[in-house]
Image: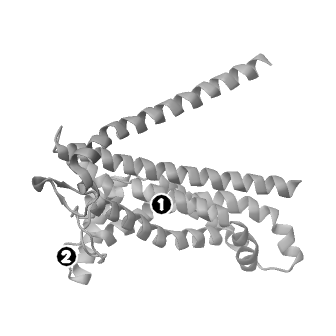
């Protein structure tokens, strides 16, 4: 009994430590962000980033981060569902094994590799194809971020759908379903919460990435409706400013951007936890 109590205490200490560190981090950002809100006024929430004129609006960067994350999610979500569904087909079991290995390998590729490949391949392709701008744009960033978040989404969906496919195998056979019908009418309709979790994780991963937007987005703090225009994301903005400023109002405005990113991350985490809790309650209800 003693080892169990000791293990519980160690786990409690670890959880408490993480909670304290997260509280300190949030308080640190809040402490440095509040003076920016009060000293600069509403300019932090304006649409203009012109530090030389005393305008420190981060909304163009918020827009850029949101557009990159949403566009990447729109591109990656159907692809992730398609890959997961294909891997569930019994007739392609050997091929599915290699696809899963490739997806896991993609998850371990450094972000800079994607960025370098895009700089030498994708950016010139966009520039020569559309004859518009430099090629460093929202579309180039979103395409590469799609490759970045795709393995995460596929692995989340696969980890949920494969056990579900094993559970529904006999049911599908008794109903005379083919492999495709089993996936379309039995597995996917029962994997909606896993889809939501995969989408939230993909969105969080996309909006939090720094290197790809820094290398590919063009880093222009502007609002645009054209995917071929340059933009700047919050993460790239923090990386750019923190490398050139120190102690100025421009530097201090970064804490507002960091607080915003932390709030998004916490919101996504809470939503995922809520989905997981709801799923566990549903499973317990079904078992009872």
Asked which quadrant contains residue 59, the reply is bottom left
Does residue 243 lie above or below 7 as drawn?
below
Q: Residue furthest left?
A: 52
Using a 10 Å C-alpha cutoff, classify the residue at mark 1 as few (fewer than 14 neighbours), some (14 to 19) or many (20 or more): many
| Secondary structure of residue under mark 1 | helix
Quadrant housing the N terminus: top right
Q: Where is residue 64 in the image (x, y as percent from the top left)?
A: 32, 64
**Residue pointed to by mark 1:** 203
Cα–Cα gap, marks 1 and 2: 27 Å
Q: What element carries label 2?
A: loop
Relative to 288, is 13 on the left or the right?
Answer: left
Q: Can residue 98 be seen in this view?
A: no
Q: Nearer the viewer, mark 1 or mark 2?
A: 1
Image colouring: one colour
Is disc 2 surrounded by few (<14), some (14 to 19) or many (20+) residues within 10 Å?
Answer: some
First in sequence, mark 1 or 2: give its number.
2
Residue 11 point in image, percent of width and height: 64, 28
On the image, the x and y values in percent for residue 24 come to 43, 32
Residue depicted at x 77% and y 57%: 282
Q: Residue 133 carries which label?
A: 2
* Residue 107, visible in the rendered structure: yes
Q: Which residue is drawn at 55% across and 68% down?
A: 80
Residue 33 shows which numbered tag? none
Q: Residue 245: which quarter of the image?
A: top left
């Amino acid at each position: 009994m003693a080892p169990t109590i000791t293990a519980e205490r160690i786990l409690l200490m670890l959880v408490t430590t993480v909670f304290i560190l997260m509280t300190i981090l949030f308080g640190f950002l809040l402490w440095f962000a509040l003076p920016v809100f009060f000293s600069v006024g509403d300019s932090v929430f304006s649409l203009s980033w012109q530090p030389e004129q005393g305008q420190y609006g981060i909304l163009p960067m918020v827009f850029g981060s949101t557009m990159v994350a949403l566009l990447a999610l729109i591109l990656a979500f159907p692809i992730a569902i398609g890959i997961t569904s294909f891997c569930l087909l019994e007739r392609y079991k050997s091929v599915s094994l290699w696809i899963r290995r490739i997806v896991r390998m993609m998850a371990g590729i450094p972000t800079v590799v994607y960025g370098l490949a895009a700089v030498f391949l994708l950016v010139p392709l966009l520039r020569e194809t559309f004859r518009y701008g430099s090629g460093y744009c929202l579309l180039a960033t979103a395409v590469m971020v799609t490759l970045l978040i795709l393995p995460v989404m596929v692995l989340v969906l696969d980890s949920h759908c494969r056990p579900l496919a094993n559970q529904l195998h006999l049911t599908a056979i008794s109903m005379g379903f083919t492999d495709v019908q089993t996936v379309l009418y039995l597995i996917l309709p029962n994997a909606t919460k896993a889809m939501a979790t995969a989408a939230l994780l993909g969105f969080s991963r996309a909006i939090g990435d720094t290197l790809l937007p820094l290398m590919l987005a063009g880093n222009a703090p502007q609002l645009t409706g054209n995917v071929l225009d340059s933009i700047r994301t919050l993460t790239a903005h923090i990386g750019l400013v923190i490398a050139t400023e120190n102690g100025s109002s421009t530097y201090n405005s970064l804490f507002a951007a960091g607080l915003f990113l932390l709030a998004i991350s916490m919101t996504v985490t809470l939503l995922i936890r809520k989905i997981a809790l709801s799923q566990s309650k549903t499973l317990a209800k079904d078992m009872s």
